[in-house]
Every structure is written in C-alpha cells, then in structure tokens.
Image (tube, rainbow, N blue to C red):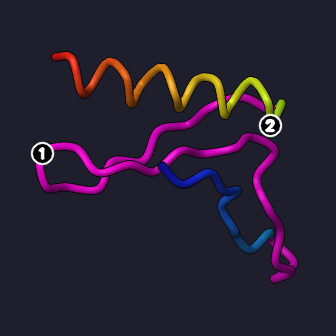
Amino acid sequence: MRLFKQDYKDKAGRRRKTRNWYIELAFRGERVRLPAYRDKKASIEFGCNVEKTCRVG
C-alpha cells in the first residue's frame, strides 16, 4: 500500500497538492488508486481495511 497526495497545476500554472490523501495498491495484478480522507491517520486505517478486504475476498 502506498499513501500519497496527488499533484496538479492550478489555473495560474502553479503546482499544488490535493487536500485528500490517496491510496495505491496492487489488486489482481493491476494498480488501483482510491481517494481516502483529509486526515492522514484515517487514510492509513482505511488503506489497511481495504488491503485486508482484498486479501479475504
């Protein structure tokens, strides 16, 4: 699992980061990116739950 904030350019051309955290994980041989929460700890917990669910299912 990888936790990160995405980069983007605003209308003025400046580089910015999103407010929300994103989770990237491998599922069935593909990379999957999911939007998480603004809070880092909550996003980590969400990512752990998603990983756990993917392993079971």
State yes or no: residue 25 in magenta.
Answer: yes
Q: Position of residue 22 (x, y in %)?
A: 60, 45
User: Is 30 on the left or on the right of 34, as rendered?
Assistant: left
**Which label's residue is closer to the chain start, 1 or 2?**
1
Q: Which mark is residue 8?
A: none
Name the residue beneath numbered marker 2: 40
Q: Position of residue 25 (x, y in %)?
A: 38, 49
Secondary structure state at the residue bearing disc 2: helix
Say which of 31 and 12 sits in front. Answer: 31
Q: Residue at x 58, y 23 (%)?
A: 46
Q: Residue at x 22, y 44 (%)?
A: 27
In the rendered structure, which amino acid carries the disc numbered 2? Lys
Q: Position of residue 28 (x, y in %)?
A: 12, 45
Q: Which residues are magenta?
A: 11-38
User: Is 20 on the left or on the right of 48, as rendered?
Assistant: right
How far, Cα to Cα, is label 1 from label 2? 26 Å
User: Is 21 on the left or on the right of 31, as rendered?
Assistant: right
Q: Residue at x 21, y 17 (%)?
A: 56
Name the residue beneath numbered marker 1: 28
Residue at the limit of the structure toward the bottom, as seen here: 13
Which part of the image, by quadrant, shows the C terminus? top left
State yes or no: residue 13 in magenta.
Answer: yes
Rate crowding at label 1 as few (under 14), some (14 to 19) or many (20 or more) other CA atoms within 10 Å.
few
In the rendered structure, which amino acid carries the disc numbered 1? Arg
Task: Residue 37: name its quadrant.
Answer: top right
